[in-house]
Image: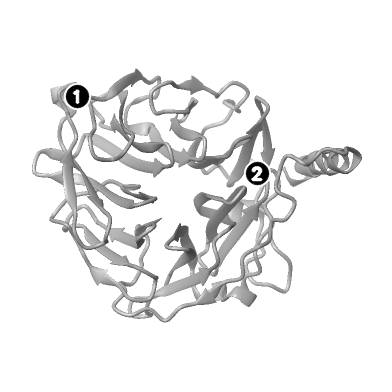
Amino acid sequence: MLTRAAPLVAVVLIAACATAVSPPFAPAFKDPVWTRLTPRNAPEFISGSEFAGWDGGFLAAYSDYTHPVQVHTSPDGVVWRDTSPFAVRVDPRAVAGYGSSAYLLGWHGGELVVNRTQDGATWTPTPLPLDKIPTEVLDTESLHATIVTGEHGVLVVGWANDLDEPNSDLYLWYSPDGKIFPQPDIRPTTAVGWTHIVNAAATPVGFLVVDSDLATTVLLASPDGHRWEDISVGFPQDAPGYLFHLGANSSTTVVERRPVEDTTRPDNGHHIWYRRAGTWHPTDLAPGHLPDPGVVPVQDRNLTALRNWGSGFIGAGGTTDGLVGAVWTSPDGSTWPKVPVRANGFDQTIVIADVVTGNRRALAFGVPDKVGAGSFIWQTDPPR
């Protein structure tokens, strides 16, 4: 896959140099330089922790489905406090933040609730209307959901994921301000029962929703949370795999396609695909450079998060064997150079779980290799 991406990059660079007009992407795209913080009262971020940033600061949440969700907030990444709103069971990808508010999605009794905070201390709960949801999937085990937010509003995506439900619809609750949610729009899905995975993202140009199973990948894009376009045409459907992370800017959509583990396939691993001018192209995360740690084959490069980063993108992760964390940046979605690991201290953690921006700074959150090792947080200036 790396050899296929190189000619494409060369063509793009030649075209950019040969024309007198401005290039389509920002010419100055600098890798961030990270400084580790010394946080106070922060929880130890373990695998499964989720993160969000907003104008008021940062949010970290964790739930193991058997205990009440633990929520901690911080104005700056240094001072943290427990602000758990109440005992809710949350799904993965259940936190989001943008602008003046951060959100936590979860169950409270029999209600699916969007909890909103602006100060990081007090929460306003808004139950989602569930009248259109079939009775047989209206429980915490069958109805799964995720929440995303950006400059175009707040979107909650729900779906049934149950052995007894061979097919399910997508339920799309949209709110322009995160305060009032009407009944959901309903879209049929061709995904098959419990084998499908749904993900979503808010982007500077709207929203993305992906529904993938072992045979089919459906990618939907919307500028407003209501009108949806299927952008799956040309995306590879010839091998089983799931889409876990996705993002977009004004010209490019980027997704991580994670093939099902199959040692007989030489290209098995984590692959980046980007769509530009209606066409999908493959590329990969760069391995880095020796003697920096974590230089591994493509199938051992592990992506845990993908975010917009200024005019481009940023990815967090590490190696599949959990030896070091890693951060990749991309100015345009086609190339993904790796930020130096040791120089930024990412060799102190087993993985960088996420990178989020809030309150005029960006934080990277690492996972320790053992209990009691403390909290791993790095800070850098946000993209401009």
In the picture, which quadrant includes the N terminus?
A: top right
Residue 220: where, in percent of width, then height?
47, 26
- Which is nearer the N-term, disc 1 or disc 2? 1
Q: At numbered mark 1, what does the secondary structure look like: helix, strand or loop?
A: loop
Which is more toward the observer, 110 or 221?
A: 221
Count of marks, rendered view? 2
Report x, y in % for residue 129.
17, 29
Give the CA separation, mark 1 to mark 2.
Answer: 37 Å
Res. 86 image quadrant: bottom left
Q: Which coloring applies here? A: one colour
Taking the spot 65% from the left edge, 24% from the top edge, the residue there is: 278
**Does dot 2 land on a helix, a strand or a loop?**
loop
Q: Name the residue under label 2.
A: 333
Q: Which image quarter is the C terminus in? A: bottom right
Q: Do the residues labelled 1 and 2 touch (CB within 8 Å)?
A: no
Count neighbours of disc 2 (C-alpha within 10 A) and say few if under 14, some if 14 to 19, many if 20 or more: many
Relative vertical location of residue 101 with respect to residue 247 in this rendering, above or below: below
Left/right placement of residue 341 relative to residue 153 reads: right
